[in-house]
Image (spheres, rainbow, N blue to C red):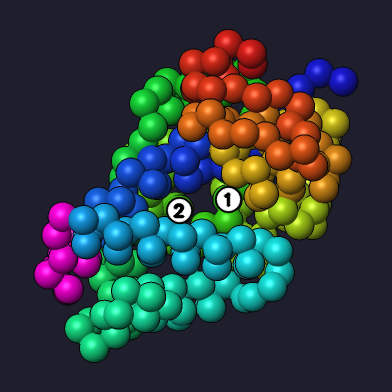
Amino acid sequence: MSIKNLIFDLDDTLLDFKGGEVADIKELFATHCHLEGPALEKALATYQGINSRLWYQYEMKEIDREEIFTSRFPKTLAALGLTEQANAKQLEEDYAYLRDHNYRMLDGAKELLETLSKRYTLFAGTNGQEETQYRRLKATGLLPYFTKVYTSEGLGVAKPDASFFEKIFSAEAAVQKEETIMIGDGLYSDILGGQNAQMATIWVNLKHKELPTDIHPSKQVHSLNELAEIL
């Protein structure tokens, strides 16, 4: 069968989530803990490590989603020895506002979707929060390119669970799995998720990471321009 549909991850595939995260976390720790220089860089790296681990645990069904938001800043402050200097709950609230207003896009994202939307039906499939992702897609002007946006919050299940994709196909009667490709940067969410659902996948490997032996994307690209060329 020919490919008719593309499911896109959003964060760090089309939207520059990490770029916004770096700026936002540094702003928080500079404001709340008065950190600068190497201490600020250490706070950023500590937060990113803890946050990444929590998201991985959520995707592996080891914790529920809410635990990410209630524990990442307490864990970070504890690891940095800053528990007495800042309020973790306030950090989370302030970060939620900054994150929800992160409207950065990766270079070429809008042009890519404009081109592909003329040939394929496009869907978004993200583990992000529903309200946040819709706000960011509207603000960046990317929303009109998608027929539908599916989030883990809305579906009640996260990638890499195969049922994330099965729920999309159940909701889209005209969309066949064999005619669909999952596209994303996340090895353990997007690519493993597509693999679990027995779908074709394209790994958007912008950072030239090493591919683990147990994950097998159908194709791999290192830029959005390369993605446009193979599609």
Tell me the tag on residue 210.
none
Q: Residue at x 24, y 88 (%)?
A: 84
Q: Quadrant of residue 63?
A: bottom right
Which element carries disc 1, helix, strand or loop? strand
Q: Which mark is residue 133?
A: 2
Q: Depth check: 168 or 227 in front?
A: 227
Which residue is found at the position 30% from the left and 63% from the top? 43
Instruction: Please tell me which residue lies in front, 216 or 10.
Output: 216
* Placement of 47 over or under 147, stated as above or below: below
**Magenta range:** 26-37
| Whether residue 144 can be seen here | no
Residue 193 appears left or right of 98: right
| Left or right side of 74 for 115 | right
Spatial CA span between label 2 and label 1:
8 Å
Q: Is residue 32 magenta?
A: yes
* Amino acid under disc 1: Thr
Image x and y of residue 188, in percent: 67, 49
* Vertical arrangement, residue 199 with respect to residue 224, above or below: below
Whether pointer 2 and pointer 1 mark residues with C-beta atoms closer than 8 Å, the reply is yes
Residue beneath label 1, please? 126
Q: Position of residue 231 (x, y in %)?
A: 64, 16
Residue 143 found in image quarter: top left
**10 Å crowding of disc 1: few (<14), some (14-19), many (20+):** many
Is 139 in the magenta?
no
Instruction: Decide whether the magenta segment is chiefly helix, strand or loop.
Output: helix
Q: Residue at x 49, y 32 (%)?
A: 207
Q: Amino acid at mark 2?
A: Gln
Q: Secondary structure at mark 2?
A: helix
Q: Nearer the viewer, residue 86 or 227?
A: 86
